[in-house]
Amino acid sequence: MKRQLIAGNWKMNGSFAANEVLLRVLAAGMGGATCQVAVCVPAPYLAQVQGLVVGTGIELGAQDVSQHEAGAYTGEVSANMLRDFAARYCLVGHSERRQYHGETDAVVATKAQRALAAGITPIVCVGETLAERGAGRTEEVVKRQLAAVIHTNGHCISEIVVAYEPVWAIGTGKTASPQEAQRVHAVLRNQLRAATEQADRMLILYGGSMNAANAAQLLSQEDIDGGLVGGASLKAGDFLSIIAAAH
Ligand code: 13P
């Protein structure tokens, strides 16, 4: 059985003091965790968290990466900069980036390639909005978003992690039912199978109001290989419960 990945997405939260407390409690409570664990932190905290996770088994992730390699792109952070902090993962195409920063499928695909080129595993986020879901377009939307990443020439797409995050479930307390989520994950798995022989060992995470109460059922689904956790990853006890529910 492949190991699941539970990744926390802190979004724009944290402080030196809060990060330290959170990571110390997580590290102390992680004993016996059988899954992989990562935290995706705001860029200014990469150095601090890089130091705090040493020897804990928790891996470091970033929340975004520039589509450009280097140069006159004020405010951007490059993949090579993330590598300087030994980031293992980087979110790309999170719905909040697509929604508030106008990231297109093509931009997301370029970002995934930048991460791969720097030896960082991109966690590629896909997911439909409530309106798209209402119109019965869930499959079409997630397949289009993933196809853009799969069909960009360059570094091997079997090295990506995929995260299915229905936009209507993010931060709303609404989750896809385990069966609904599994159905979409199976669609994504088949799409990966058509592109690479490695599809069955690739991780497809679920995200969207995953919490201590619903994690076990979601994580027991055949094609759900872990979670991308927002709000609950900021509460050590809740995040540890989700970690304990994974394998
Ligand atoms: P919530 O867990 O807060 O719904 O956020 C999910 C998410 O967007 C993770 O990337």
Image (cartoon, rainbow, N blue to C red):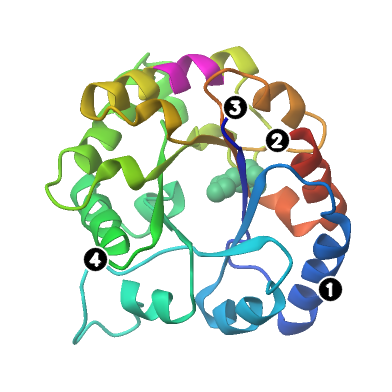
What amino acid is at disc 1?
Val
Q: Which residue is mark 1?
A: 21
Mark-to-mark CA distance, 1 and 4: 33 Å
Q: Quadrant of residue 184?
A: top left
Mark 1 vs 3, N-terminal side: 3
Quadrant of the image containing the C terminus: top right
What amino acid is at disc 2?
Gly
Q: Which residue is mark 3?
A: 1
Q: Does the beta carbon at disc 3 come under 8 Å from ligand 1?
A: no
Mark-to-mark CA distance, 2 and 1: 25 Å
Q: Which residue shows up at 36% across the image and 67% down it?
A: 65
Q: For the residues carrying marks 3 and 2, which lies nearer the camera in this image? A: 3
User: Is disc 3 placed on a helix, strand or loop?
Assistant: loop
Residue 78 seen in the figure: no
Extent of the magenta region: 181-186
151 vs 132, left or right, is: left
User: Is disc 4 placed on a helix, strand or loop?
Assistant: loop
Q: Which residue is mark 2?
A: 173
Above or below — where is 162 with respect to 93? above
- 182 in the magenta segment: yes
Q: Which residue is mark 4?
A: 67
